[in-house]
Every structure is written in C-alpha cells, then in structure tokens.
Image: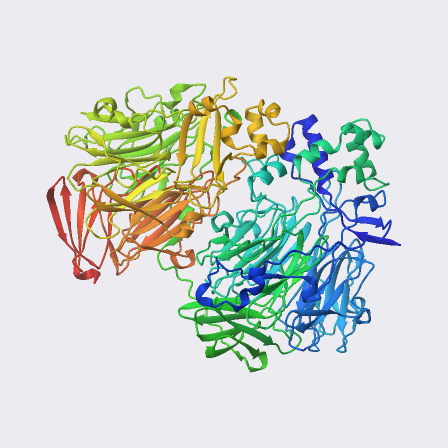
C-alpha cells in the first residue's frame, strides 16, 4: 500500500550548492537560496515497532509538590514536571521510518510532519488532545482528569491512517456548540474536517464544506476576517520544490465562510498574492483597528508577508513598510503582547544554533545576501516588537531569544503566573542534515561507486535528473548523517523585553526532537501544562507546578460568542490590576502545526483582585466586569455585550511633527559602493559608511541658520541657505565641488580667522580611495567671504583618516582652537591613527598635539569628542570616545591637557562608543553625558569578566594582518567568526582543522601559538550599552544604561533640549548601522527615540505615536536649527544612503527660544529654575556624532532667569518674561 511520510531534503540541496561553489565560486549567493522542502512517496518495507523513550523523572520534582512557596523561587524549583506515558496514558509515537525503507525515487522532505490540537471535545470541562503524524493513525485522547488521558476508540472516526498529516485545529466550525477537528494533509491528500457528532464520534465533511483542499497543506487558522460574525479560514500551504533553481512556491488559501456551512476560496481576490513555502500564520489585530490581520511565515527565499486587513474584504501586503527584515528559514510563529503596552508583537523561529560547536558545524557562512545590497532576510529568530503604529523592530538578540537551533514552534504564554509572557521554543530534526562534515564526507568515493557514479559532479547531475522522474536511493547518504537531539527552550520573561533561558531550571532536562506543541490547563489547577509531539519517541506531557509552588495567581477567561463564532475567536480581553494592563487575543492556531484551547489565561503575580476585565468583541461590542477575584475561570457571553460608539483617536502629535522635504530641505545621501571586507575580510564593521555629517550656523549673516551636509566620496558637501520663509535652498560651492573625491567626515562651522563670519572645516577620512591616494586624507579648511561663499584655506599636513572635529578656545586668546579625532588607518585596522590638537594663531593652525597632550595623539580609533568643563573650574576640558576604547578625559590645567581617566569611573568601560553629548540632566549644576554605543541587540555579549576581544597580527605570515575576534561561551574563549570566514583569511587553518568539528571544539588559546597571541595588537570591549554618565563631582562619574529600547540598535546622533517644556532636559536620538560583518547582517531595529527626562537623571522612553518622532533608516548625525519664521526648531536627521528627514518642534505656551550668537563667545550659561534648582548649559562647537547644532536655548515656563558666562565671568543675565506662564 502506498503511503506518505516525510524525510530530510536540505542535505542534497546543500550538496548541490557546495558543488556549485566549487566550480563557479558563488557559494555566498547560493548557499541558502534553495534549501527546499519535498514530499516523499514511499512504501513501508515492514512495520517498525515504535521506539519509546522514557525519560527518568527527577525524584525531587516528583515529590516537590508538598513544598511550600516560602522556600521556593522560580530559579530553585522546576516549574514543569515531566510525566511518563504510563502516568498520563498518552501513548503516541510520531515514528519516522528509516531511509532505507523508502522506495527509490522518493522526493526528500524535512522531517517535520505531525501536529497537536487541544480542546474540550466532549464538553466535560476537561481539555482533550488530538495528535497527528506520518502514515499511521492520528489519535484523539480524552482527558479523564488529573492529567490522565484515554485514547478514543477507532470508532471515533478521526484516525486518518493513510495520510501524512500536519497541522490540526479544534474549532466549532458548524456553530453547534462542540468542537470539530480540522487536519491539514500533505502530499496532495485532501484535508480533513471532522465534524463532531456530539456522541463521541466524528464525520469527515471537508468536501461538503468546501475545505477539502488537495495540496501541501501545513496548518489552518480560523478567524473572522470580514467581521460578519462567522469564521473564515486561512490555509498555510507549502511549495513544490525543485532541485534546480526554479521557484516552487505556491499561494496559500483564504476561504470565506458563506454562512451556510460552505466556504469559497477568495485568496487572490482578497489580495493574498505572494507564492511561497508557507509554514505558519499568526492571526492578530496588529494595528488595533478592530480587524484581524495575517502574518505568514515562509521558508527559504520567499520572505514572510504581513497582510494588513483593509476592512473591505481585502488585504494589503505591508511587510516592507512594517518590518526591516524577517527570518530566512521562517518556520513556526506566534503573536502576543509581550510588554503589556496594548499592541500585539510576534515571533518567528529559524535555524541559528545557540552554541559555539553547532554554529560552526552547521554553517559555513551565516550570510544570505550581499551586505552591500539586500539584507531583508536573516538566519535567526526574529522577535518583532510592535512600535504602536504597525511597524516593528526585531529585538531578538536584545531579548535573548535570537538563536535556538533548528526550531519549529514558538509559543507565548505566562508559564509561571508572574504577569509576563514567557516563551517556549521547540527544536528537532532527526538527521543532522546541516552538519558540514557529514555533507563533505557523505559523497565519499566508496559511496559513489556503490551508486554506479564516478564523482560528485556526476552525482549532482544524476540527482537533478532523477529527482522528479525516477528512483533515487538515499540510504547511503543518510547512513552517514549523525543523529541529533537539541533541547527545547523555555525562556522566562524578565518583565523588561528581555528573557532568561530557564530551560533546565524549569524542568526541560531531556532533549527531544519536538515539532509541534501546545499548552492548556489540563488539570484545571490554574497554570498551563504542556504537550509535545516528538519525533521518534513518545509524545510528552509536562505538568506545570506553579500553583503548587505558589508562584503567582491567575485569571482564566472563556468567551461564548453569538451567531456562528461561538468561541469569540478574535476578541480581545484586557485585565487591569495594580496599574498594569494585559491583553490576550483569542486565536486558536499557534506556533507550528498546532492550536490551543481557546481560553485566555492571565498570570497576575501577587495581585489578589483584578480592577477590571474588558472584552472587546469583533464588530465593536464591549463588556466590562470590575473588582474580580483572582484564581478562577470566568465566562463572558457576547449576547450581554453593548455596542460601543467609536471615538476617533486623537492623532495629534504631542512633541514633534514631520516636515515634508519639499517644504523645507530636500537632500538625499548617496553612499559610494565600496566593500570594506574585500580588503580586510575579518573587519568587525565597515569603515566607509560613516556619513553624513552635518553642521548648523548662519554662514551668510542674514540672521537665519543654515546647514552644511558632508558628502561621500564622489559627491561634494552640500550647503543649504535658510530663507525667511523657513525653507532651505541649495547653494553650490565651487571649492566644495572641486574636492568631491574626498570622503567627508566631521563638518564644523566656526570663525577660523576672527573676521566675524563662519568658516568651514571638513575632516577627510573613510576607508576607501585613500589607500591608493593618501592625499585624500588631508583635512580641508574653507574661508567664508562673509556672504556664504567659500574658498580653500590652509591647514598643516594631516594625512590621517579623521572623523570628529570640535572647537573651543582652549588657550583663552579669543579665537577658536580645534581637536580633530583620527578614526582609522585605511587598510590597516586596528592601527591607531593620529589625532590632532590644532592651535589657532591668528587664523593659522599649528599642530601642538605633542606639546600639549601627547597622550591623545594615538589615543585610539576616535568617533566623537566634546569640549566640556567637566569639573566646573572654568577651563574647558576634552573628552574623547571611540571604538574599542574607554572614554578618555583630558583635564585642562591651563598649560596643557592631562589625562585623568584613571579612577574616574570611566576607565573600565571599554566599548564601541559612537558619540558623546552632554547636558545637566539632574539639575545639580554640573554637566552629565550621553554616550552612544553598539547597544545590546547583537550577538556580541560583553562584560568585564567576559569581554569581546580582538587580536590582530599577521598570524599566518603571508603579509596581511589577521583580525581574530573572540568571545566567551561557558567560560571558554572562542573565535567569534565561523570557520569559513577564518579559513578564507587564513587558509592554513584548513590543514590544522581538516574537519569543521575540529575547529568547533578548539578554543582560542589552543588554536594559535602563544607567542603569536602575546605579540598581537590587543583590544577589548566590556560594555555595549548606550549610557547616561552622571557627573558625581570631584572627577568621578557613574554609568547608568539608558532605557532598554535604546539598546535595540547602535546609538549615533543625539540632540539635547527641553523638548516637552517641563524644565528638564530630554534626549532625542537616532541610530542603526547597516555595515557590520557579514555574519551580523545589519543592525536596523532603531526607529529613533525620544527620552523624556525628569530632572533626576532618569529617562522615560516615549513611543513614537506619542512623540511624533521616527527615523527607521541607517541614521547617523542629528542637528537642530531655529526656524527663520520664529515658530519653532527644526530637527534634521542625517541618514546614510537615504533621504534627510526633517522634524519640527513648534514653540508653544510652554516654551520659547533664546537665540545665541556665536560671536558673543559664551562658554556656558546657568539656567535658574523657579523651583530653586539650577541647570548648567554649555555651548558647543560640535557634539554628538559628526554633528554641530544650533547654540540656541529652548526654555520653558519653569525658567526664572538665565545667566551667561565667559570663563568665570557673568556677561549677561536675562529675566524670563511672564508670557511663558
């Protein structure tokens, strides 16, 4: 009898791609393009007895139920207890037949079939379980109480023994009050719809309902997409793969409920237009408009798709607008509000291993596309945080859940009842088909001879030819593949967007190959138990012990809908207590090929009452219940709900408004294409995409502030003149155009020659061009004629790739002197370049670095600098930050600069610092600092104990410098880059490590001779957090990380002002970086941020829907300029390879702008607040990242007066007008 089941395919696709690389050298492009899924048609040779693995139960767990909560914490006592099949009666084995039992000619498929659905099919108040698998009968297990299950008899009619079954969903599709069962079938077998007859039997009526789709079905989701009161269905369909490079993606299906127990497929008509290899869908109202949307997770090269409901029966694909990237091998997905902000987030899982060994034996490279062009898909899990406007930021690394190996099912739920949603991720693949050594050696000569083939080329040709036409014996290959078991993952929410891996602590101590999973309160004790559908072993049930350990209280909500959506699917339930609100949307299909029980389970921690429960039904009706007791299950009936009048949401932006470019300043930054990694393969980051820089000042003396924007190589710097109407007009400069071959870095407007107008300094740097022509590193000075026309000036010879340029009168002679930071030595990373102190002598600049501050000459790879009086002694000091550096403080002694970093509290904070800006954030009269860093949303995890380290040396002595970055895993130091990246730089490693596993098991100290390590250039990073640095006085500082959302991306540009008019300084920031090494893809989770200060050095992150500020691009510099119309402040965000963004902060009754003329020469001001506090304010010629902003001060009605200082002398005091009150 012909039957269907599933076996692995990616093995041969990777084989094919390796061969392509060998002859065409294009492995980078092809490696992950065509790992595809196929279905197998096979004959059982003989029936194999199911293998039953019976893990041992920890005796302490078995007896732990008698312990009291006082002695237990979630870290010390397992949340879950593994039950055996003897204890539960759940005997279900999802057995994969051996490859040798396949009929020749079988197509390959990844071992993934089998699903699980839970629900109360017999109405006895206990949650039952239905499980699917390959070829052998699916089973229904009836819950008999106390986690005991009994297999339903064959007469129940749900066995389906002749199919390859995938996802299954319980749903009351015929609206008769009991649960029916839908099964998605693979390999062109009709799907099943088992209608519950109410007597313990079911009848397949898929054909009558029009839901008997025949194809490669994965999972069905039932939801009311048109808000007409009945349930429609979205069916995830997988593609038909090919061994060659033709796409085999297909359209998934959308079925509209006709209202009479029949359905009509309307997918294309409704806008479901993208073919793909669908593996899951997450249904949710992602934009809070009351209509359900669809997120589709696709395997392989077809990206995921977010279809937003248009409220007219159609959907719009908004993926590119809503997300910056998706997973590449997207498998299971789930949606929930993980941070209790009222917006639904979602997660997809992929294949990136979580440990050093498997990462280096599973992948040759982790790149998908060229980092120069397209990085819209990444081989990693994505945790997409909803930013409140239906755009999302992937915070997977920040949350700690980005890499969980070959994963299938993610599920959000509060497993320990603490009020925050945790995450379950299941793992598993029977054959380790990604093992690079197995792939390399499986086609050994003896195997080829046994197949009648001569070499690998013939094998590939034969495979492609025979894949769809004749028999292919795979057994010789699969016998060479290792078996693998990887633990499933349980992540406990920390309550702050981050999660801790508590798999072992919570009781996941036995590794399984798990595909599908679901949860329910099977024993009705108030916590969520688990059921796992495992490959080649018995299904497992975990009892949740949270209630026994008194870990938290709970509330469960069941809905009874009217009309034909009897379970109220799609409704949103909100519980509010102790100032916290949680939401859950009811949607049954979750994770991969699985569905839940249709209840809303809320853990509420120590709360003993719920202030209010609100149910918002699809269609707009609502009902509320106040003062609800915890630890119970409550029922809401839609028939009791009341229609709620829709109140238009006030979309008025509270702080900033976006300004269209054509109404202000239209500029697009075009980066020249240069591949930094071609010259230096192991660079941590590209060094050629630092711009654009910006500087603001009145260059033509008309009283309006203008702006200069630095250009990349091949493009001149741009000068824009502000007109009286507030618009900016381009003013081309011949001198700038003539120097367009330079790569502009920092730009500064200052009076170089003391003639009363602003001249221009442009730092030259980057990483390209200057290797062949070092003169392109020469910085440039342009002299203003007073009318905004510039001609080339003279600087000393400075052939260093520089970055930041900032000015102050450090010798107190009345003119402005300069610090110029060296960024890198092109082609010779990480050699420290030269930085400069330039003394202004009557308009001539003299290099006095060696005389005044020898230590700063080669301080490091400088990114930003700030002239600031950190110790309030009236003399301007210098702080310098950079890559692989601590912040360096240089105290102005009046005669020279003395480094005083040691003992300051900054001397151990080695980071990849991008920027420094400043303000008196705690209103204590001294200057505090904001430091932009890499952030925490990357694979780099650094601390003082376990730093990220860099060793640079010509290790293989072939004339090129090798950069080996290392990290620590389980206390051991390993190379951070995967083997192929290392081997491409140092080919001799292939001889030293003939197998991938040899490299994977070697730690860094044993990999290279000690003398080579000891003689290498050594750098380290211990802190990647962007920080607020509090000035404690007496030269002491304290680091405090900025809010966690700021850590989601590298922080570059910042603007410091009192933006909300409360008298306290706020922070506006931008970031992202699209140029990390090819294994890191890109950092793109930043959307710009507004941090509201409270005057105590504390900051609140305001979502962009409240602030109005957003920058989703590869952002760099940020500057402010006063509007010529005196109605507010412009904020300019400079984006790399993208258009400039312009925002405006309007003046209002709370704020006003005090204009500052740079010619006044003020060094700082003291702002006296009405509450008696004083705020110090310094005036900067350059701050933040390659930025120079307006010196104007924005003040609020809380300001009483302002005193302006030059040195220690008060030059002017302004009493603020009462009009601000």
Residue at 19% across / 30% down in the picture? 755
Q: Position of residue 347 (x, y in %)?
A: 56, 54
Q: Observer-nearest residue: 18 or 83?
A: 83
Q: Observer-nearest residue: 1093 or 230?
A: 1093
The quarter in which the N terminus is drawn is bottom right
User: Quick check: 156 above or below 907?
Assistant: below
The answer to whether 218 appears left or right of 502 in the picture is right
Q: Position of residue 1183 (x, y in %)?
A: 30, 40
The answer to whether 262 appears left or right of 545 in the picture is right
Residue at 80% across / 29% down in the picture? 446
User: Quick check: 914 above or below 962?
Assistant: below
The answer to whether 488 appears left or right of 204 in the picture is left
Q: Residue furthest bottom?
A: 640
Quarter holding residue 1025: top left
Q: Observer-nearest residue: 275 or 136?
A: 136
Would residue 346 be visible to someone looking at this image? yes
Quarter holding residue 714: top left
Q: Position of residue 1204 (x, y in %)?
A: 15, 46
Residue at 56% across / 78% down in the picture? 636
The answer to whether 974 appears left or right of 806 in the picture is right
Q: How is the image coloured?
A: rainbow
Would residue 757 be visible to someone looking at this image? no
User: Quick check: 259 above or below 451?
Assistant: below
């Amino acid at each position: 009898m012909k039957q269907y089941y599933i076996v692995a395919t990616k093995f041969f696709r990777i084989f094919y791609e390796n061969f392509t690389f060998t002859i065409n050298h294009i492995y980078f492009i092809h490696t992950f393009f065509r790992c595809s899924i196929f279905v197998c048609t096979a004959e059982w040779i003989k029936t194999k007895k199911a293998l039953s693995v019976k893990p041992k139960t920890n005796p302490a767990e078995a007896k732990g139920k008698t312990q009291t909560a006082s002695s237990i914490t979630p870290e010390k006592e397992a949340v879950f207890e593994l039950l055996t099949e003897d204890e539960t009666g759940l005997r279900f084995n999802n057995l994969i037949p051996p490859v040798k039992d396949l009929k020749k000619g079988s197509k390959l498929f990844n071992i993934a079939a089998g699903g699980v659905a839970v629900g109360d099919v017999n109405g006895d108040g206990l949650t039952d379980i239905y499980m699917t698998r390959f070829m052998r009968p699916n089973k229904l297990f009836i819950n008999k109480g106390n986690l005991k299950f009994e297999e339903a008899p064959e007469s129940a009619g749900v066995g389906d023994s002749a199919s390859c079954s995938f996802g299954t969903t319980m749903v009351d599709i015929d609206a008769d009050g009991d649960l029916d069962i839908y099964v998605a079938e693979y390999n062109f077998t009709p799907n099943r719809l088992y209608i519950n007859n109410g007597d313990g039997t079911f009848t397949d009526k898929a054909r009558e309902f029009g839901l008997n789709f025949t194809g490669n079905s994965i999972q069905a989701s039932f939801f009311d997409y048109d808000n007409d009161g009945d349930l429609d269905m979205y069916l995830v369909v997988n593609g038909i793969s090919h061994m060659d490079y033709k796409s085999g993606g297909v359209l998934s299906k959308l079925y509209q409920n006709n209202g009479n127990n029949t359905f009509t497929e309307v997918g294309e008509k409704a806008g479901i237009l993208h073919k793909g290899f669908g593996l899951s869908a997450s249904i949710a109202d992602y934009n809070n408009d009351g209509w359900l949307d669809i997120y589709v997770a696709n395997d392989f090269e077809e990206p995921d798709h977010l279809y937003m409901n248009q409220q007219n029966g159609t959907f719009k694909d908004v993926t590119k607008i809503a997300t910056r990237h998706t997973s590449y091998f997207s498998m299971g997905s789930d949606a929930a509000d993980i941070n209790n902000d009222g917006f639904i987030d979602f997660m997809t899982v992929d294949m990136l291993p979580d440990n050093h060994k498997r990462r280096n034996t599973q992948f040759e490279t982790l790149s998908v596309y060229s980092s120069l062009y397209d990085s819209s898909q990444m081989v990693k899990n994505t945790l997409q945080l909803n930013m409140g406007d239906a755009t999302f930021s992937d915070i997977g690394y920040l949350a700690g859940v980005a890499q969980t190996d070959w994963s299938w099912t993610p599920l959000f739920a509060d497993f320990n009842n603490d009020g925050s949603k945790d995450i379950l991720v299941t793992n598993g693949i029977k054959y380790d088909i990604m093992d690079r050594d197995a792939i390399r050696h499986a086609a050994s000569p003896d195997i080829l001879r046994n197949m009648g083939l001569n070499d690998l080329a013939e094998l590939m040709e034969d495979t492609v030819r025979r894949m769809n036409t004749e028999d292919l014996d795979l057994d010789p290959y699969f016998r060479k593949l290792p078996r693998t078991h990887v633990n499933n993952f349980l992540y406990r929410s920390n309550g702050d967007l981050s999660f801790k891996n508590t798999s072992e602590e919570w009781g996941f101590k036995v590794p399984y190959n798990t595909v599908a999973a679901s949860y329910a309160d099977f024993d009705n004790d108030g916590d969520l138990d688990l059921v796992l559908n495992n490959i080649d072993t018995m299904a497992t049930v975990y009892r949740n012990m949270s209630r026994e350990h008194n870990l938290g209280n709970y509330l469960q909500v069941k809905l009874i809908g009217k009309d034909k959506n009897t379970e109220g699917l799609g409704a949103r339930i909100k519980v509010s207590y102790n100032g916290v609100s949680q939401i859950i949307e009811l949607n049954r299909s979750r994770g991969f090929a699985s569905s839940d029980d249709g209840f809303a389970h809320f853990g509420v921690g120590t709360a003993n009452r719920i202030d209010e429960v609100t149910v918002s039904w699809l269609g707009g009706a609502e009902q509320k219940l106040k003062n609800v007791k915890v630890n119970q299950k409550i029922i809401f009936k839609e028939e009791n709900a009341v229609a709620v009048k829709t109140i238009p949401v006030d979309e008025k932006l509270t702080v900033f408004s976006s300004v269209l470019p054509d109404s202000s300043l239209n500029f697009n930054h075009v980066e020249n294409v240069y591949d930094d990694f071609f010259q230096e393969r192991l660079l941590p980051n590209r060094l050629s995409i630092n711009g654009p820089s910006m500087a603001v000042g009145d260059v033509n003396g008309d009283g309006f502030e203008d702006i200069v924007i630095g250009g990349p190589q091949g493009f001149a710097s741009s000068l824009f003149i502000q007109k009286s109407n507030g618009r900016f007009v381009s003013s081309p400069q011949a001198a700038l155009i003539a120097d367009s071959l330079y790569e502009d870095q920092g730009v500064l407007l200052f009076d170089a020659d003391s003639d009363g107008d602003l001249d221009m300094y442009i730092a030259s740097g980057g990483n390209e061009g200057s290797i062949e022509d070092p003169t392109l590193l020469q910085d440039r000075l342009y002299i203003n004629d007073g009318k905004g026309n510039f001609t080339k000036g003279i600087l000393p010879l400075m052939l260093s790739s520089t970055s930041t340029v900032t000015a102050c009168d450090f010798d107190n002679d009345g003119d402005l002197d300069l610090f110029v930071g060296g960024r890198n030595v092109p082609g010779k990373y990480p050699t420290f370049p030269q930085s400069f102190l330039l003394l202004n002598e009557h308009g001539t600049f003299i290099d006095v670095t060696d005389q005044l501050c020898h230590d700063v000459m080669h301080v490091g790879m400088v990114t930003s600098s700030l002239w600031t009086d950190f110790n309030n002694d009236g003399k301007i000091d210098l702080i310098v930050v950079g890559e692989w550096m601590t912040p360096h403080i240089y105290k102005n002694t009046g005669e020279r600069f003395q480094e005083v970093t040691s003992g300051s509290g900054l001397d151990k904070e080695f980071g990849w610092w991008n920027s420094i800006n400043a303000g008196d954030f705690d209103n204590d009269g001294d200057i505090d600092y904001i430091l932009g860093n890499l952030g925490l949303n990357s694979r780099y995890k650094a601390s003082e104990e376990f730093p990220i380290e860099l060793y640079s040396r010509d290790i293989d002595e072939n004339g090129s410098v090798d950069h080996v970055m290392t990290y620590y895993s389980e206390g051991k130091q390993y190379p951070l880059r995967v083997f192929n990246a290392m081997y491409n730089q140092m080919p001799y490693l292939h001889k030293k490590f003939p197998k991938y596993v040899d490299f994977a098991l070697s730690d860094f100290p044993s990999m290279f001779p000690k003398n080579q390590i000891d003689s290498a250039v050594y750098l380290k990073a211990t802190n990647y957090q962007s920080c607020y640095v509090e000035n404690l006085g007496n030269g002491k500082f304290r680091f405090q990380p900025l809010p966690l959302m700021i850590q989601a991306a590298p922080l570059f540009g910042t603007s410091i002002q009192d933006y909300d008019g409360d008298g306290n300084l706020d922070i506006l920031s931008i970031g992202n970086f699209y140029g990390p090494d090819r294994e890191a893809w890109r950092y793109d989770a930043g959307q710009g941020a507004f941090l509201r200060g409270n005057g105590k050095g504390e900051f609140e992150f305001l979502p962009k829907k409240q602030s109005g500020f957003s920058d989703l691009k590869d952002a760099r510099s940020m500057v402010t300029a006063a509007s010529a119309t005196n109605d507010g402040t412009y904020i300019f965000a400079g984006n790399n390879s993208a258009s400039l963004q312009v925002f405006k902060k309007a003046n209002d009754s709370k704020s006003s702008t005090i204009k500052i003329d740079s010619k006044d020469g003020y060094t700082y001001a003291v702002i006296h607040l009405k509450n008696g506090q004083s705020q110090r304010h310094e005036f900067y010629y350059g701050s933040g990242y390659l930025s120079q902003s307006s010196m104007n001060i924005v003040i609020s009605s809380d300001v009483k007066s302002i005193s302006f200082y030059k040195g220690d002398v008060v030059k002017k005091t302004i009493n603020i007008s009462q009009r601000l009150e």
